[in-house]
Image (spheres, rainbow, N blue to C red):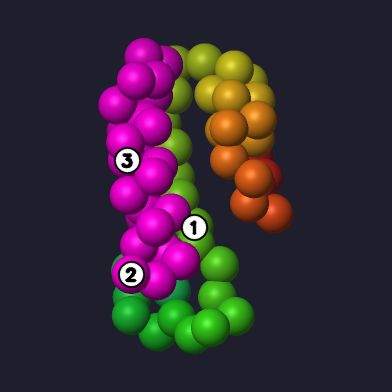
Amino acid sequence: MDKVDLLFNEFKEWSVHQNDMKGVAVVGSYVRGDYNSRSDVDLVIISTNQDFTLSIIKSDFHYSGIKS
C-alpha cells in the first residue's frame, strides 16, 4: 500500500466520526491518473463549520501543506 492509499484509508476512518463534514472529493492529478512521485493529493471537503474542520484536520493529520 502506498502513501496515498494510507492517507485515504486513514482519512476515511477518521472522517466518519466528524459530524461537521458532509462530503469529501478527491480532485486533481490523482483522479486524472497523471500523477507522479512529486504530486500532491487534492481534497475538497464540504463542512458546515469550515474553521473547526480545518483546525481538527491540521491537529489530527501531520501532513505538510494542508491549506484552506
Residue tagged by mark 2?
Answer: 1
Q: Disc 2 to disc 3, how far (Cα)?
A: 15 Å
User: Which mark, residue 12?
Assistant: 3
The residue at the point 44 percent across, 37 percent down is: 45
User: Which mark, residue 55?
Assistant: none
- At numbered mark 1, what does the secondary structure look like: helix, strand or loop? strand
Which label's residue is closer to the chain start, 2 or 3?
2
User: Which contiguous range is marked in magenta?
Assistant: 1-26
Q: Residue furthest front?
A: 1
Residue 21 among magenta residues: yes
Residue 15 versus residue 11 in the image, above or below: above
Which label's residue is closer to the chain start, 2 or 1?
2
Q: Quadrant of residue 19?
A: top left
Residue 60 horizontal/vertical position (percent) = 58, 32
Res. 50 visible in picture: no
Residue 64 horizontal/vertical position (percent) = 69, 54
User: Which mark, residue 42?
Assistant: 1
Residue 17 horizontal/vertical position (percent) = 34, 20
Res. 23 visible in picture: yes
Q: Amino acid at mark 3?
A: Lys
Residue 49 versus residue 62 in the image, above or below: above
The residue at the point 49 percent across, 62 percent down is: 41
- At numbered mark 2, what does the secondary structure look like: helix, strand or loop? loop
Q: Nearer the viewer, residue 13 or 43?
A: 13
| Neighbours of disc 1 within 10 Å: few (<14), some (14-19), many (20+) | some
